[in-house]
Amino acid sequence: MDIRFNFPHQVGTELECIRDALEQGVLAGDGPYTKNSSEWLEGYLGASKVLLTHSCTAALEMAAILADIKPGDEVIMPSYTFVSTANAFVLRGGVPVFVDIREDTLNIDEELIESAITSKTKAIVPVHYAGVSCEMDKIMDIAKRHNLIVIEDAAQALGSYYKGRSLGTIGDFGCFSFHETKNIISGEGGAIVVNNETFIERAEIIREKGTNRTRFFRGEVDKYTWVDIGSSFLPSELVAAFLYPQLQHIDQINDERMCIWNGYHDALKEVSFTHNVRRPVIPKDCVFNAHLYYLIVPEPELQQKMLSDLKRSGINAVFHYVPLHSSEAGKKFCRLGSSMSVTDALSSKLVRLPIYPGLTDSQRSFIQSTAKSIIQDF
Ligand SMILES: *Cc1c(COP(=O)(O)O)cnc(C)c1O
């Protein structure tokens, strides 16, 4: 067997939509498929404004500009995340301040945020790891009391909820990814949700190279010009044409992932108790999208052993993240806002299993039984 760690799932009508876009003769950004996708997302999320971007990285960069991050401004976030969470702010001269994560969800530890706040703090960036929500009530309360902007890195969290609210719609901004490794994909792709309405007009300008082109197309101004800083953050119509049918199949896709997730979770229940392996924890206020399945093994040596044993059986499993505070750029551009004990212990113990709709039933049970026998061998 050779089971890939990820395979970009297609719903079947992507090419048809791309052909339709070609026939309509609109290939640049903000054509009909972009409009349909962003309106679909607004309805699905219950958000007032969603703008498609060419990646979640781009959405985070837009959020950093909108939050008016200036050189020296501090932004509180976890170290256990993807580089773009921090890099977007470093590009503006901002300083990411890392706070440790919770033992259970591996999300930012909300109890440590307040003591990392200084007079330079401008924003908090909660990352909803694995599609499971951070403790948003507490984070929003801290932000309100200290007058901070909240940018949700919801890259992994489309289709997840916190107390009934869609992730990405709780902070001032929410950033989603449609990278081929996420649940809903367009190769590369993303979206920014602008929840704080005072930022909508500027968001449109920044996304369109600093011009008021969007207002021009709505007929609100009679010519468009350069009015602010910005860049080209919008995706091509071809990308949006791939994305649109994917969005419409979100329930099917997430149900399929949940089925695989539950299969692993049940199959590995007993062996993880007897061999001291930790499975994911989903707090009761959270509905999640089964974005990824991970195990935490008791010793760092067992991580490499498990990964290579899986590989020998033809199962490609991986770990992540190298904590940003221990990376070369992280040391240069960021600082610590708390101890990193949970973060430091974690990344050498985490193992992720393949999870995507294309996995066949026999592949799923093979992964379950192989993982189980490897753990029994610990
Ligand atoms: C995938 C991911 C990103 C980056 O998304 P892109 O669309 O690839 O730019 C950012 N943050 C987190 C937490 C991610 O998982």
Image (cartoon, helix red, strand yellow):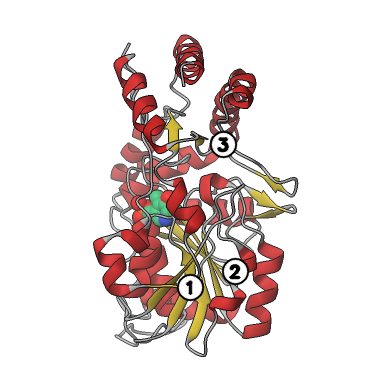
Residue at x 37%, y 79% (from the top left corner): 94
Image location of residue 37, percent across then percent down: 48, 51
Disc on the earlier residue, 1 or 3: 3
- Residue 177 visible (yes or no): no
Label pair 1/2, CB-CB below 8 angstroms: yes
Label pair 1/3, CB-CB below 8 angstroms: no
- The 10 Å Cα crowd at callout 1, few under 14, some 14 to 19, many 20 or more, is many
Q: Among all residues in the image, which is located at the extreme left?
A: 328
Residue at x 34%, y 88% (from the top left corner): 227
Image location of residue 13, percent across then percent down: 42, 31
Secondary structure beneath dot 2 equals: helix
The image quarter containing residue 142 is bottom right
Q: Which residue is mark 2?
A: 112
Image location of residue 144, percent across then percent down: 67, 80
Q: Which residue is mark 3?
A: 290
The image quarter containing residue 279 is top right
Which of labels 2 and 3 is toward the front? 2
On screen, 170 above or below 346?
Answer: below
On screen, 258 above or below 124?
Answer: above
Residue 2 vs residue 106: left or right? left
The residues bearing labels 1 and 3 have C-alpha atoms spaced at a distance of 30 Å
Give the quadrant of the N terminus: top left
Q: Among all residues in the image, which is located at the extreme bottom?
A: 119
Q: Which residue is mark 1?
A: 337
The residues bearing labels 2 and 3 have C-alpha atoms spaced at a distance of 27 Å
